Image (spheres, grey):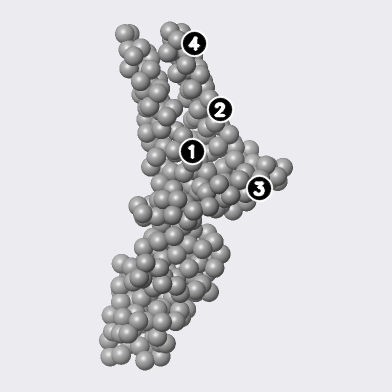
Amino acid sequence: MRELLTKLEQATALDRAGDRLQRAVQGTLRSQRIRDLLHGVWLGHPLHPAMVQVPVGAWISAAIVDLLPGQRKAATALIGVGTASALPAAVAGLNDWAGLARDQRRVGLVHAAANVVGLSLYAGSLVARLNGRHGMGRALAYLGLSAASGGAYLGGHLAYKQGAQVSQSISELHLISEGWHPVGDLTTLPQRQLVTREIDDVSVILYRHGDDVTVMLERCPHQSGPLGEGDVQEIDGHACVVCPWHGSAFRLNGGEVVHGPSGNDQVVLPTRIVDGRLEARLP
């Protein structure tokens, strides 16, 4: 299975279809507000994995209920809920997928294809049940669950092995030792400009506004972009750093994500001033 997944990550033959679909998704979801909504920016957490709990839960419940006598109506209702709720979850997933790296998009494309097959089978199951063909409906539902389970396995590979929509910066937080660390003299820090420093070989960015200084991990949580090379922009009345790679934006006074494709906030370290020297520590 590992060898198969490695080959899938390297399957350049999928790029032609994947690139076309990416352009179609980006062309359709042009509104930044809609994209941010689907990324889960408002939640501070990717939205797609939360949304898939509804169809997956409904479909698994239907598979159990189908084994019980006299539960045809309940099973049909669960299949209907799962099938209907899978559509918005798929839209959120496509929105996330369009912002991934190419090797991630290859696996994501097959993940989506497996889920489309599963959804089609469940839609057929729902139609069969509504027409009184409950035996056919059960058979199609179990086939749909098999396809959706394969898609879920690939989704897990995307998240846990390839790091899709997982914060890429959080691992660096674990490299910083406990205690306060000197970062620099306050008088040497320019006002309202990004400055890059290191704490235990971990790159951080500093941003001074008056006597308040933000110390933030530099690696963008989306795809490890260098936030120290990004621009500072005012968004909704807050100074924000914008990643130069994919445009994710984070508030400099708290780390909250305000624009995707990142669905995760960025880590900000607590600070203090001791004898004119700026120090930072782990949260």
- Calculate the distance from the C-alpha at mark 1 to the C-alpha at mark 4: 25 Å
Label 3: how many Cα within 10 Å (few below 14, some 14–19, many 20+) = some
Across and down, in percent, residue 258 comes to 40, 61
Label 3 sits on residue: 19
Front one among 161 and 97? 97
The amino acid on which the numbered mark 2 sits, given as a three-letter code, is Val
Mark 3 and mark 2 lie on one chain; the one further toward the N terminus is 3
Query: In what element is the residue under mark 4?
Result: helix
- Calculate the distance from the C-alpha at mark 3 to the C-alpha at mark 1: 18 Å
Label 1: how many Cα within 10 Å (few below 14, some 14–19, many 20+) = some
- Calculate the distance from the C-alpha at mark 2 to the C-alpha at mark 4: 17 Å
Residue in view at x 47 percent, y 56 percent: 32
Label 4 sits on residue: 136
Where 210 sits versus 19, above or below?
Answer: below
Mark 1 and mark 4 lie on one chain; the one further toward the N terminus is 1
Across and down, in percent, residue 86 comes to 44, 33
The reply, left or right, for residue 246 in relation to residue 34 is right
Label 4: how many Cα within 10 Å (few below 14, some 14–19, many 20+) = some
Where 116 sits versus 166, above or below?
Answer: above
The amino acid on which the numbered mark 1 sits, given as a three-letter code, is Ala
The reply, left or right, for residue 257 in relation to residue 104 is left
Mark 4 and mark 3 lie on one chain; the one further toward the N terminus is 3
Label 2: how many Cα within 10 Å (few below 14, some 14–19, many 20+) = some
Q: Return the mark for residue 117.
A: 2
Quadrant containing the N terminus in the rendered view: top right
Residue in view at x 38 percent, y 42 percent: 50
The amino acid on which the numbered mark 4 sits, given as a three-letter code, is Met
Q: Return the mark for residue 90.
A: 1
The amino acid on which the numbered mark 3 sits, given as a three-letter code, is Asp
Quadrant containing the C terminus in the rendered view: bottom left
Where 59 sits versus 229, above or below?
Answer: above
